[in-house]
Image (spheres, rainbow, N blue to C red):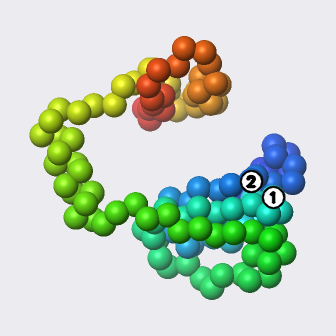
Amino acid sequence: MIGDRRSSRCPGGVAKVVDSVGVSILSHALAALAPGGEVATLGLFDAAGGPLDGYALLGKQARIRGVAVGSEAMHRDLVSYVESHGIHPVIDRRIDFLDAPAAYTAQTSRGLFGKIVIEFG
């Protein structure tokens, strides 16, 4: 549960939760927030969530902000453009999933240029 992990690693909660799933995780996102925090919701890929807990929202004095990321047609156009022009992200290093904490350490290292990829399997 988010609350259990948060209490030992981030006492008081986090300043921002970036939600790329949808409203079904909103109660967990609010539980993880510090007072005055913000939930940035990027999409509604999972729109089957329950009602918003107004008490949790008011109790944390939190903000929920919707972030527009474009339509499905815009995404298809982007993917087509990237594929037809051979565009690839710059990858600094690849780290195995079992060593995922090293990826967070790598993000703060000097000389980082490009993405850090966590690979599964």
Left or right: 51 as drawn, with respect to 67: right
> Where residue 49 is drawn, which disc sits there?
none
Q: Which residue is mark 2?
A: 15
* Rendered residue at 83%/63% (across/down): 35
Circles 2, 1 touching at the beta carbon (< 8 Å) = yes
Examine the image and state in which quarter residue 101 appears.
top right
* Rendered residue at 27%/57% (across/down): 75
* Rendered residue at 21%/41% (across/down): 82
Q: Which residue is mark 1?
A: 34
* Rendered residue at 59%/22% (across/down): 106
Amino acid on which the number 2 mark rests in the picture: Ala
Examine the image and state in which quarter residue 2 appears.
bottom right
Q: Residues within 10 Å of mark 1 (few under 14, many from 20)?
A: some
Left or right: 23 as drawn, with respect to 62: left
- Residue 66 in view in this figure: yes
Earlier-in-chain disc, 2 versus 1: 2
